[in-house]
Image (tube, rainbow, N blue to C red):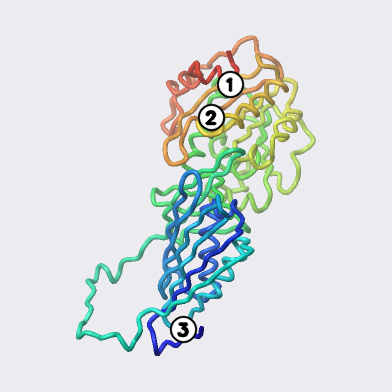
Amino acid sequence: MEFDVTESLGRQLIGELYECDPLVLNDVAAVEQAMVEAAVAANATVINSTFHHFSPYGVSGVVVIQESHLAVHTWPEYGFASVDFFTCGDSVDPMVSLKHLTQSFKSNDMFVSEFHRGQRELLVKPDFEVKFPPMIQKAKADRSVWVTEVRKNTMHSFKLDVGDKDNSTFGNLKIMQVPNGEKVLVRENELLTDTAVSKINHEMLLYVPLAEGIKPTSTLLMGIEGGSLLQHIHGQEGEVHWHVSEKELECAENLYGISKQNPSTNVIINSSPELMQYDWVVLDELTVREKGPYIIQELAGKLSEEGCLSICLGKVSDNLNEVKERLHSLNQLFGKRAVRCYLAMVSGDRGGLYLFAMACKKQKAEWHSQNPSQNASHYYYSPEVHQAAFVLPPYLSRQLELI
């Protein structure tokens, strides 16, 4: 059915998409991305979008365009999606959007109904002048995006308000500024890390082992998060090596405001860690997640005779099984008595109870604190936090098989 703008105000397509990929239909980030791309493919001007994931499955959302809207509701359990594309004027063809969405949802069967809305022969235009207050005329809505935190057995979606002017892109990695001044790192709508969580985790990764008596002459940091760790470790005695690719380095410079020009740091770019042994290897949770479980064994093999490994094992409140697997690997590599666990509580959307561990190649007769000091520049760490971190609730100790 051809659309004649002289006969009606708008064109509406109701699409029923059958035999879709249920995993796509249940991924709120993927659905939003597909809908926004469908609007752009039809030459529509995207104003904003909002999407919601229902428990245990199903996504609803709308993309507001200058020419009207695109809406969707999904039923992953049936592999079905219902879409409503409404456009005004003749500059946008909603059929293009519908075909794009059919490919994105991997639909094998589709039915379409078309309606022309606002028949001009029935319309009566009143004598009415619209006046907007200056405040409304100047207002600009923030863009809301959904990002998903993916773990081995869980997925959590977060809605972020961001400004396009604050985005920086490095290949498929994007850094976005959020209203509280923090930054998040996203890869194709998957939330990788954010500075609010990192600054707490990284203080606990570094300051706790140092206060427990670790005195490294050589330290190895890995990946993007090494940029944040480098800020905290700056000023410590000994040589610090940072294994990071060119793209990761660019991201780290933007995300954490650091520079590879730090004269006290030997920055290793685009290569494996050097064929040497380190007194201290620091592994953040993002690196463990991205590199896989074998990275723990690989880097444990690069420790000196009395070397120690510090690691963020992950968030026990959401990913207990994954944390237990990593802890089991440590116990096998170092021996259970050579591994000491401690906790940190992080607030915010990505907050929760995070578990850390120190593992020493040469088993310590006993662990003891070297009088942790108070530093006004610390965001989270303090002597009191240090002491409390080693107090694990009995239920958690049992779940982690520590008792």
Between residues 151 and 277, which one lies in front from this camera angle? 151
Q: Could you tell me the amino acid type at mark 2?
A: Val
Residue position for label 2? 316
User: In front: mark 2 or mark 3?
Assistant: 3
Task: Find numbered disc 1 in the image and state the secondary structure of the residue it sits on.
Answer: loop
10 Å neighbourhood of mark 2: few (<14), some, or many (≥20)?
some
Note whether 5 is above or below 191 in the view shown. Answer: below
- CB contact under 8 Å: marks 2 and 1: yes
**Residue 144 occupies which quadrant of the picture?**
bottom left
Q: Residue furthest top?
A: 365
Q: Contact (CB < 8 A) between labels 2 and 3?
A: no
Q: Could you say where residue 300 lies in the image, as x and y percent from the top left?
A: 72, 28
Residue underneath mark 3: 90
Residue of label 1: 400
Q: Residue at x 25, y 86 (%)?
A: 124
- Mark 3: few/some/many CA within 10 Å (<14, 14-19, 20+): some
Looking at the rendered structure, the kind of residue marked 3 is Asp
Q: Quadrant of residue 61?
A: bottom left
List the single residue furthest toward the right.
275
Which of the two labelled residues, at mark 2 and mark 1, occupies the earlier sequence position? 2
User: Crowding at label 1, few (<14), some or many (≥20) Cα neighbours within 10 Å?
Assistant: some
- Find the distance from the CA under tag 2 to the CA under tag 3: 53 Å
* Image position of 207 (left or right of 306): left
Instruction: Tell me what residue is drawn at x 73 percent, y 49 percent.
Output: 270
Which residue type carries mark 1?
A: Leu
User: At 54% across and 48% down in the image, what residue appears?
Assistant: 191
| SS category of the residue bearing label 2 | loop
Residue 252 in picture, x, y percent from top left = 58, 48
Which of pointers 1 and 3 lies earlier in the amino acid sequence?
3
Disc 3 secondary structure class: loop
Gap between marks 2 and 1 measured at Cα: 10 Å
